[in-house]
Image (spheres, rainbow, N blue to C red):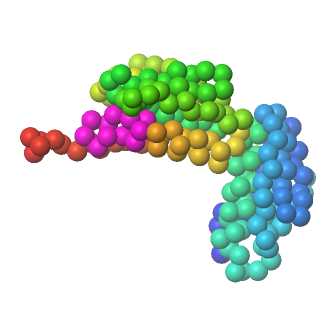
Amino acid sequence: MSRIGKKVITVPAGVTVTVGERELTVKGPKGTLTTPVPEGITFQLEGDQLQAVRASDDLAARHGLARALANNAIVGVTEGFTKQMDVVGVGYKADVQPKKIVFSLGYSHPIEFPLPEGIEVRGERVPTKASIQQYQLTLTLSGIDKQKLGQVAAEMHNLRKPDPYKGKGVRYADVVLKLRPGKTGK
């Protein structure tokens, strides 16, 4: 039994949902997204109510997945998604340019990170993060596709993972990093 799959999705005003056999197309004020529909799952649109229906009880996991993907598409085209990344470390920098970000992360060369279509980045220094030692700036990623946004954030994180002792690197802003004590720490 899938609790998530059973939930009905309310389609907001201004959003058009087109139900296909293998895909769901959602068009809204921020753009258009196409979501794949797993085999054995169908969507029914009645008025402003969208519901995922499964063919048999063996498809409970796919049922929840299909409903979650459809809901993410609807939220994406109406509100969009954001994710924040902190750049921490002495001399670490990120220069936001129109189609790319140029990172300086302690390597012998700058790293050019190309931005995929549909992802926007804003870089700013947040005064409330002054408690983080060696804090440099926060990058705010935004877009309508939740999966693509998460993938871009993960690739940025992998450019320089946070050091376990000082916390230097590119890290997720919402993840609390527990630092290890050094040799003299007890």
Q: Is residue 118 visible?
A: yes
Q: Position of residue 178 (x, y in %)?
A: 29, 44
Q: Is residue 39 left or right of residue 165?
A: right
Which secondary structure class fits the magenta region best?
loop
**Which quadrant does the C terminus fall into?**
top left
Instruction: Examine the image and state in which quarter residue 56 appears.
Output: bottom right
**Residue at 64% across, 33% down:** 115
For the point 68% across and 57% down, the residue is 68
Q: Quadrant of residue 183?
A: top left
Q: Position of residue 135 (x, y in %)?
A: 36, 25
Q: What x and y, as percent, mark residue 31?
A: 81, 36
Q: Is residue 102 left or right of residue 80?
A: left
Q: Nearer the viewer, residue 3 or 54?
A: 54
132 and 128: which is toward the camera: 132
- Looking at the image, residue 186 sits to the left or right of residue 58; the answer is left
Question: Can you give x and y, in whole percent of width and height, for residue 29 in the image?
Answer: 82, 33
| 96, above or below 42, in the image | above
For the magenta stretch, what is the residue range? Answer: 160-173
Q: Quadrant of the N terminus?
A: bottom right
At a point 29% along the width and 27% down the height, the residue shown is 133
Q: Is residue 143 visible?
A: no
Identify the residue at the far front of this view. 108
Out of 180 and 52, give the one closest to the viewer.
Answer: 180
Q: Is residue 78 above or below residue 35?
A: above
Magenta residue check for 169: yes
Left or right of 54: which side holds 160? left
Q: Residue at x 31, y 40 (%)?
A: 163
Quadrant in the picture for residue 128:
top left
Q: Work out whether 95 lies above or below 38.
A: above
